[in-house]
Image: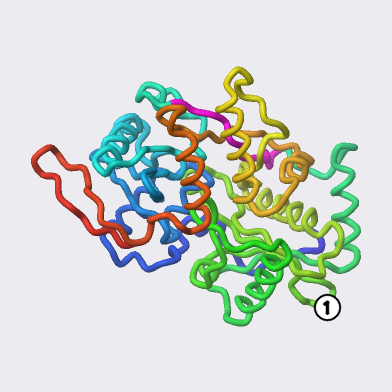
């Protein structure tokens, strides 16, 4: 791709980067094995970031979760063999019942909605993953003219896309940390948890990171890449830029990433989550409407900046539904509040005593420390 340079990269190795924390516990090793074998979503890698507990089904599935108050929130769908998904769902619900928790699954995909329904859960749409077909991606045509002009202008001015492979150097890590701090200060926010990664030096050092360098060679924006294991798809986690951001630089970053991923042979690129343009669930049920609206706003915060839907749709992605799966409408207020607190890092996901489901007479307490 003209105007870009690359550090040596083997895209196949993106799925084998070491996790953020050394797998010093048997449960973490087991979780990693399941994720690498069965992971098929843009959220699967987040289970390895140290802020979640693990529920293991008896037949090889994993559910990463955190709890707040009387609610346990699982991240996405169970990760495991398709034939075990229903048993994993019902097993997790029984496990939550044992602990006095309401079970919920947030950012579940569309594939297993029938399994949830059979298990007695309901669901509401809370957002989308925006996925670009790289076989169709190019800069031709009127619909792509806006970001094509920005991309070409910045490339001619000397801005460059650079891909850095792990482990990142201390010097590079310090530069990225400064940009991240500037970004957080500008958006008046703090690092979130659970639904995305955060700037932890160990995590970022072990990631593939794309940077945009200005004509003087200074880094002004970056994104770290996230594996999807069994899908020939790549996605991004953190996307951050410094205070002196030229107009169009985020378009330049994403166009460069899409070009790179296409050249590396990926089928699709997941731009990440976005909220729908408007809320339209069940007007006859005001409670559903209010909770859905609240969750949309939470999702907008999880993914970092406003206008995500408008920004991402110009890349003409396919929108794949993300759902909140819950046991009944009466529990929605508690679930919504728990999601907000878990997102803020207030959930119990790092050190927790829990009962691990075993066959009837073999239930025992297990200490889980991520």
Residue for point 90% across, 66% down: 157
- Give residue 150's quadrant in the image: bottom right
Residues drawn in magenta = 122-135
**Quadrant where the C terminus is found in the figure:** bottom left
Q: Is residue 284 above or below residue 90?
A: above
Residue 128 visible to an observer of this rendering: no
Seen from the viewer's position, the closer of residues 151 and 293 is 293
Residue for point 28% across, 56% down: 27
Seen from the viewer's position, the closer of residues 214 and 244 is 244
Estimate the x, y position of residue 5 in percent, counting from the top left.
73, 67
Q: Answer left or right for 119 relative to 300.
A: left
Q: Is residue 175 above or below residue 260?
A: below
Q: Does 130 lie within the magenta span?
A: yes
Estimate the x, y position of residue 125 in percent, counting from the top left.
57, 31
Callout 1: SS:
loop
Question: How is colour applied across the structure in the image?
Answer: rainbow
Q: Is residue 300 above or below residue 136?
A: below
């Amino acid at each position: 791709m003209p105007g870009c340079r690359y550090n040596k990269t083997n895209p196949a190795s993106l799925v084998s980067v070491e996790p953020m924390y050394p797998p010093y516990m048997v449960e973490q090793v087991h979780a990693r094995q399941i994720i690498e074998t069965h992971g098929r979503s843009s959220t699967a890698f987040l289970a390895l970031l140290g802020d979640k507990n693990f529920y293991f089904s008896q037949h090889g599935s994993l559910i990463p979760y955190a709890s707040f108050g009387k609610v346990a929130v699982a991240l996405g769908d169970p990760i495991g063999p398709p034939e075990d998904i229903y048993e994993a769902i019902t097993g997790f619900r029984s496990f939550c019942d044992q602990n006095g928790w309401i079970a919920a699954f947030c950012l579940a995909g569309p594939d297993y909605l029938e399994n949830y329904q059979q298990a007695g859960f309901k669901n509401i749409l809370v957002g989308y993953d925006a996925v670009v077909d790289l076989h169709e991606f190019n800069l031709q045509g009127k619909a792509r003219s806006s970001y094509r002009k920005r991309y070409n202008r910045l490339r001619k001015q000397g801005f460059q896309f650079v891909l850095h492979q792990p482990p990142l150097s201390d010097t590079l890590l310090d530069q990225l940390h400064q940009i991240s701090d500037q970004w957080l200060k500008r958006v008046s926010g703090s690092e979130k948890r659970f639904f995305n990664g955060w700037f932890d030096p160990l995590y970022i050092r072990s990631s593939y990171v794309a940077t945009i360098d200005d004509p003087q060679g200074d880094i002004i924006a970056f994104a770290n890449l996230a594996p999807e294991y069994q899908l020939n798809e790549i996605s991004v986690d953190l996307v951050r830029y410094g205070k002196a951001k030229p107009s169009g630089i985020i378009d330049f970053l994403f166009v460069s990433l899409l070009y790179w991923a296409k050249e590396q042979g990926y089928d699709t690129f997941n731009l990440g989550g976005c909220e729908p343009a408007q809320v339209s669930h069940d007007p006859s049920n005001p409670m559903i409407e209010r909770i859905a609206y609240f969750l949309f706003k939470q999702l907008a915060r999880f993914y970092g900046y406003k206008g995500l839907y408008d920004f991402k749709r110009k890349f003409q992605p396919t929108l794949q539904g993300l759902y909140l799966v819950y046991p009944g409408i009466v529990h929605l207020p508690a679930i919504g509040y728990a999601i907000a607190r878990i997102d803020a890092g207030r959930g119990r996901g790092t050190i927790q005593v829990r009962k691990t489901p075993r066959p009837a007479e073999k239930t025992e307490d297990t200490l889980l420390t991520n």
